[in-house]
Amino acid sequence: MNFRQLAHFSGLMLVRNWRMGGLNTILLLIILVIALISSLSWYSDRMQKGINARAAELFGGDLIIKSPRPLPSLWEQQAVNMGLKTTKVVYINTLAASKLPEPHFANIQVKAVDNNYPLYGKLKVSAANDTNKTENTQAKPTPGTVWLEPRVAYELKIAPGSTIEIGAARFVFERFLYEIPDGQADQFKIAPTVFMSLDDLEKTQILGPRSRADYLLMIGGPINDFTAWVKPKLERGQNATTALEGRLEVKAGFSQAMNYLKIGIFLILLLAGSVMNVGLKEYNRKNDISIGVLRCLGMPQSQVIQVLLLQFLMLIILAGLIALPLGFAMHYLWHLALGEMLPTGLANELGSINGWIGIQALLFCGLFLFVFGIQHWLGLGRIPPLRVLRHEQAPPSVTHRLFFAVKAATIFALLYFYLNDLRLVLFGLTFLTVVVALIRFFCFILGKFLRKVAHKLPVVPNIAALNIARYMPQRYIEIIVFTLISFAICFSFLLYDSLLNSWQKQIAPNTANYFIFNIAPETLQPLNRFLEEQKIHIAHVYPILRGRLTELNGTQLTKKEGGESIHNNALTRELNITATNQLPQDNEIIAGKWWTPAEEMVPQASVEEGLAKNFSIKVGDVLSFRLADQIVSVPVTSVRKVAWANQQPNFYIIFPKSMIANYSITYLIGIRLLPQQEPIIDNLRQKFPALSILSIALIIDQAKHFFQQLSVLVVWILCFVLIVGIISQNLVLWATRKEREVETAILKVFGISLGRLLGIWLWEYGFYAVLSSFLGISLAYFLQKFILLFYLNINPIVHLSTIFITIGINGTIILLATAVNVKKNMEVTPISLIR
């Protein structure tokens, strides 16, 4: 037969198999898997875009190149040629002066920008020092004018319209500056900002050969190609930081969400693959007689294999035609329900959907399921027709074992290509292999035990126990699948509990939403009195010491090749170091130990985990810092895990309080303001004009809203795992129904009542439900600790109610599915099987 005839014949066989029943359940599972994977992939792609856009808004650009010297103009031109937006920014610390009516001076940080600034967001400014009269704008200071933070105006004793001197140039103070959409600037900096045009910077003559300035090139748009082009060209002292790398508090929370999506996809694929392995065996068994007849009629082996492959291809195409529109509809519903967590432009732009992602999901699912069927199809094509007609399997051979290895390698490659997460794939497949081996051994021991005790049981449990023992070599596949279903349901519940608990802790009710910093020691007590009088909740108070990290064990520290930019940048700036004798909330010691009261007078340091990993800092190493005009060396006594997503001050380095006694320090206070208390900020600015105030109330509100919406997404994934589990259990029971039909008919011949027959099946599958629930919950309980700690980076939490809910759900699903299938089995008569 030519290909057209083979395709036509394959279609006829597919229709015939559909009419025989069973194929509809397999098709339903394939449709569901493709729909779920495609919808999750579409939404995760849109969510990733939203993550990057949000981080870029906070960071000031999708990519920021920072250098201690002017950057080559070729780099900006290359970015423009690639269709990217660019802007140049220069930071430099200097002195500003006002001469009228009498001289005043202030340390300032000049921020000079070109006409393209800002790439994202707007500046918050006002013509008067009044937060109630602010406006959001993308305008910049005109040449000859500057915008000042209120603290600069206070220190220089000037008002809008006054003149200030910066270097060799004079400028007119035009507006007050409250917020800048640029995460590169240090939020808790010592010097307040003076905002000016980049064209005016040269007039000041403050840039010289020995000037310590930062030259930034901010880039907006799809940066992957440009990043790959520019990174090999970076020299010593230069770095390129993406938005997510630069905003750890954003990266931490969103990466947990993306990792949970990956785990959800992996669980769905785990269930689908294990169940399809059972379902396709039954489907192939129904084809055995047809294939045997075709071989007897002289069809070549190659054409037999082609017929089987064409049937599977038609099945996948049919499933794809139904599943992809269904997946898109599901994604669209998520988009409507959860679109508020995305930036406005992206949330409204439905045309940004990537159709290739759906095709990719279809191809992946097709190949993934194809791997489970190809071995049997190749076997049918090779073995003699008589053996096929007798339903005899070919004896294991070296080729069979080799093909098993190839199948395992193919599954690994497919999962790695799709999930792009080596840790998850390796751990997941290793876990699956160990579980299969352990359950198979456990079932072997259990079968022997039931044979010994069955005669001591009443009639109905006796028959059920003998059935379990007799079919244990074949039924262990069912137990494995039921265990994996129970594991997936329980594991999803446990992850859901732990994630929600972690997110609720990160945004606690008393989380500080305003920060007051640059507080002089003599101002601390009057400020505390003012806050107490206004009944404002003080969340925390930190002393701040500025210092530069210089050496590790006497060797000068340099940027680590391949390290994270945010950590490498710790060497190019002064760090905010705090001192406390109490471990900060949401900090966890992962190496070493926190100092005891007896050790508080000993110089030592606690280091943040990311910084320690980046520079290979271990407990016992000696770090050197430049503090003011001194070099101080201290041993590392502990390494801390920090909750970057909690929107609170976190520190790379912490000293004991005794170490800062002889240094000039300032203080940072975090306060919690209720909406009705926010007008107090104006009084605070007027009473303490030298202080700097930072509001993160909007960021916290956005984070709360995001986590609320994200919890809905997690519930969706949990429901999907549950739905796949229900269909999977029905498919497993359908695939093994033939043996039950024969046994039912034989028992009816011997006159067993329908009540006892139902009791036998309920005892048997009730045992499977209890056993699989116990194994699945045990595996989920022990595994979730590893996954949560080492993969999602959060502390596990287990509610007993979750375990009981899982047992109830799993047992109910198995028993209901059993009752439905047993009802069909009890309708089978002995004469119908003989016919």
Image (cartoon, helix red, strand yellow):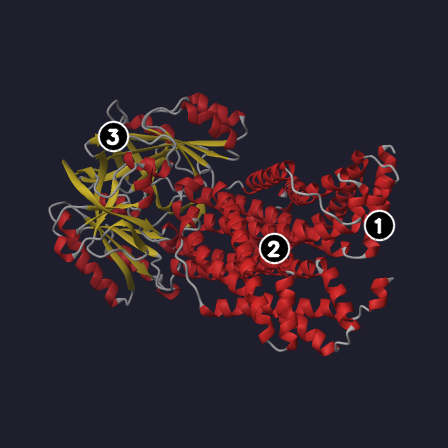
Callout 1 amino acid: Val
Residue 767 rendering spot, x and y as whole percentages = 59, 68
Callout 2 amino acid: Trp
User: Which residue is depicted at the point 68% across and 67% down?
Assistant: 818
Q: CA distance from mark 1 to mark 2?
A: 35 Å
| In-image side of 637 versus 565 (left or right) | left
Q: In the figure, residue 685 lies in which quadrant? A: bottom left
The residue nearer to you, when weighing 199 against 835, is 835
Residue 98 rendering spot, x and y as whole percentages = 22, 38
Lower sequence index among marks 1 and 3: 1
Q: Which residue is mark 1?
A: 15
Asked whether the residues under the numbered discs 1 and 2 touch, taking CB atoms below 8 Å apart as contact, a structural biologist would say no
The residue nearer to you, when weighing 241 against 385, is 385
Question: How many C-alpha atoms fall within 10 Å of the one at disc 3: few (<14), some, or many (≥20)?
Answer: some
Q: CA distance from mark 2 to mark 3?
A: 56 Å
Q: Which residue is mark 3?
A: 167
Q: CA distance from mark 1 to mark 3?
A: 86 Å
The vertical placement of 486 against 374, above or below, is below
Where disc 1 sits, the SS reads helix
Where disc 2 sits, the SS reads helix
| In-image side of 27 versus 77 (left or right) | right
Question: How many C-alpha atoms fall within 10 Å of the one at disc 2: few (<14), some, or many (≥20)?
Answer: some
Question: The N terminus appears in which quarter of the rendering?
Answer: top right
The residue nearer to you, when weighing 200 against 38, is 38
Asked whether the residues under the numbered discs 2 and 3 touch, taking CB atoms below 8 Å apart as contact, a structural biologist would say no
Visible in this render: residue 173?
Answer: no
Q: Which residue is mark 2?
A: 334
